[in-house]
Image: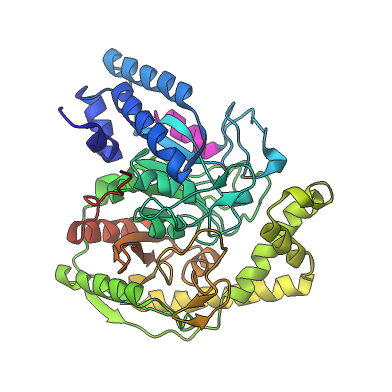
Amino acid sequence: MKMNKEDICFMSACDMKDAILRQELTSQEITEVIIERIEKINPIINAYCTPTFDTAREMAKKADEAVKKGEKLGLLHGVPTSIKDLFLTKDIRTTFGSMIYEHNVPKNDEVVVKRLKKAGIVLLGKTNTPEFGYAGVTHNLVFGESRNPWNTDRIPGGSTGGGAAAVASGLGPITLGNDGGGSIRIPASCCGVFGHKPSLGRVPVYPRIELHAESYVHVGPIVRYVRDAALMLDTIKGPHDGDRYSLPEEKISYLDNISKKPEKLKIGYSLDLGYAKIIDPDVARNVTNSAEKFAELGWSVENVNFKMRKPEIPFYTLYTADYAFDLKPKLKDWREKMDPELVRMVDAGIGYSALDVMKAMSQRTKIYETFYKFFKNYDILITPTIAIPPFELGIMYPPKINEKNVSPTAWMPFSFPFNLTGHPAASIPCGWSNEGLPTGMQIIGNRFNDLLVLQVSQAFEEIAPWQKKRPNFN
């Protein structure tokens, strides 16, 4: 297989795996080319915070030897992969983006990392995250700020911002992320890649270290090709007794079924969900045009109206209370060495009463009921992923949208409701702003229906592929 180095870096994980199994390319060849690209581009975008190149070379060598020996091979055999710096990795520094854990080296992998290793990945390194993954932007006091590969003066999103920037830049085909309020989907939208937040519990979390937030944090992939998300989810899904939220095994392969298109599908789309009143016109145009493309497949597409109170109040209450519970004990010794915005959030969470939290839980139930009623009549819900294209570095949120003053969550109103409800949701590239920045469309399925979200995403990729366009670092 004759390919130039850049084309190898932008191969899909599925194609890499097949080329390795057929011995058309070795895992070592692919890994070296990607490492060379990381060494060139990572200083520009700061996607990787802890590269593990020696480990990657050892894993790639073993992967090639296993192919030659005809051994039984895993689903991701020999495929270079990155992991967000919120996941425990044995003998590899795991900082959670915090100076508190700047020199932390775990003695064990957590469950999802074990599954990836068993599947044969080649671990390129850990990717950057905001401290304890708290923000929709990616910076911390240990490693600094990650940048958007399409415009390095813009955010890559967060909290899996380093991973999304790496995938978009050809620094590995897949990355492992997690999502407690949009942390897979927001950076996928900002970086022009595909991110899937599976149903809550589809991928187990164990052990839970530092941030517990167990009822709304999802684990999933960020990739350039939808099929690669299906491949990765086939690898990491399935129950684990250590996670009481983990779901039973479905006994299906997402990858084997992803190209099957339902004959009939009823899709509803909304640009506001009844409460998000401000949206960038480029995003509104791209999402509307993209949603209507599904009619080409013979599916029903309707603009739907929602009546729902703002979900940001119950989400903020629960989110900040969780962080306060976990991090309040750290404030005495570490307050001055933590992200000031995170400290402010923890202080706010400390102030909530038990009644405040119970009220938020009650409101959470009502939000779920809104979408329960929607999915009685529709198969898929489509919204923007975020309300604007990626904004400037150095700020936590844009103070204005369309020249109007906005709240801190106004730029990302569409993601966190589906952490409150647990529904599967993906962000898929759906066009570009007038400034040449990517925009994302969110595809949400009914509870537990990850396969349908992937099938609809795959169908959209076939209608409107995006992968030929690549960031320019010259």
Asked if the magenta segment contains residue 114, the reply would be yes
Q: Could you say which is closer to the camera, residue 74 or residue 429?
A: 429
Task: Tell me which secondary structure the magenta stretch mostly adopts.
Answer: helix
Residue sitting at x 35%, y 64% = 440
Q: Position of residue 258 (x, y in %)?
A: 26, 51
Quadrant in which the C terminus appears: top left
Asked if the magenta segment contains residue 360, the reply would be no
Q: Quadrant of residue 66?
A: top left
Quadrant in which the N terminus appears: top left
Residue sitting at x 40%, y 49% = 222
Picture layout, residue 229 above or below residue 200: above
Q: Quadrant of residue 447?
A: bottom left
* Residue 249 visible from this viewpoint: no
Q: Position of residue 217 (x, y in %)?
A: 56, 55
* Residue 30 visible from this viewpoint: yes
Q: Position of residue 132 (x, y in %)?
A: 63, 50
Picture layout, residue 467 above or below residue 415: above
Q: Could you say which is closer to the camera, residue 142 or residue 245?
A: 142
Picture layout, residue 366 above or below residue 170: below
* Position of residue 341 in the picture relative to residue 380 (left or right): right
Q: Position of residue 279 (x, y in %)?
A: 41, 78
Picture layout, residue 83 above or below residue 267: above
- Number of marks in the image? 0
Q: Could you say which is closer to the camera, residue 255 or residue 346?
A: 346
Residue sitting at x 56%, y 78% = 366
**Which span of residues is magenta-colored?**
111-121
Residue sitting at x 51%, y 77% = 400
